[in-house]
């Protein structure tokens, strides 16, 4: 059962919004770089269900501690052996750091699609160039 959080930040909305769209656009083989805490586990599990239901597969997962500064050992495991997608169920600061480091490792240039499962347009990346091609779900609560 999905874990829910306040507002639109819940595993069901995030997994369905990003996961199903990435599979539909060709990202059928997934690897998860997951934050090592309950919400990260729940988002990764729900996203894996969505990916499989949409016709994709999960080829692996690795868990990284929150507030990790060096993601190199985790990114080496996520490096594509063949074209696939990586889901990033991680909090904002860790997502930004890991995606910057993924760019340094050439993961996106190697053909892998990145899916920021807990990313937001409201938390801009310091280097927009490195976030090119990132897929994410953004909530819209209407106009007030």
Image (cartoon, rainbow, N blue to C red):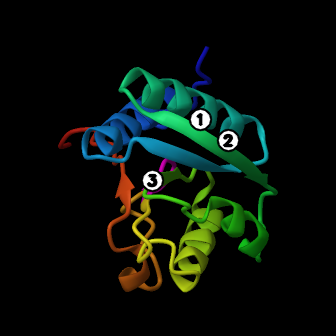
Identity of the residue drawn at 50% across and 34% down: 57
The kind of secondary structure element at disc 3 is loop
Q: Nearer the viewer, mark 3 or mark 1?
A: 3
Q: Is residue 46 magenta?
A: no
Residue 41, percent from left and from top: 70, 35
Q: Nearer the viewer, mark 3 or mark 2?
A: 3
Identity of the residue drawn at 56% across and 85% down: 104
Up/down of 61 relative to 39, above or below: below
Mark yes or no: residue 10 visible.
no
Crowding at label 2, few (<14), some or many (≥20) Cα neighbours within 10 Å? many
Asked whether the residues under the numbered discs 2 and 1 touch, taking CB atoms below 8 Å apart as contact, a structural biologist would say yes
Q: Write down the residue under mark 2.
A: 40
Q: Distance between the Cα atoms at labels 2 and 1?
A: 5 Å
The kind of secondary structure element at disc 2 is helix
Q: Write down the residue under mark 3.
A: 84
Asked whether the residues under the numbered discs 3 and 2 touch, taking CB atoms below 8 Å apart as contact, a structural biologist would say no
Q: Write down the residue under mark 1.
A: 43
């Amino acid at each position: 059962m999905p874990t829910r959080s306040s507002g639109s930040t819940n595993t069901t909305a995030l997994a369905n919004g990003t996961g199903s769209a990435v599979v539909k656009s060709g990202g059928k083989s997934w690897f998860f770089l997951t934050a090592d805490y309950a919400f990260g586990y729940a988002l990764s599990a729900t996203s894996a269900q969505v990916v499989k239901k949409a016709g994709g597969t999960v080829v692996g997962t690795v868990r990284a501690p929150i507030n990790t500064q060096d993601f190199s050992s985790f990114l080496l495991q996520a490096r594509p052996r063949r074209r696939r997608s990586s889901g990033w169920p991680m909090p904002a600061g860790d997502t930004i750091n890991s995606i910057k480091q993924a760019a340094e490792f050439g993961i996106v240039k190697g053909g892998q699609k990145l899916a920021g499962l807990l990313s937001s347009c409201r938390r801009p990346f310091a280097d927009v160039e490195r976030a090119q091609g990132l897929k994410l779900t953004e909530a819209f609560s209407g106009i007030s």
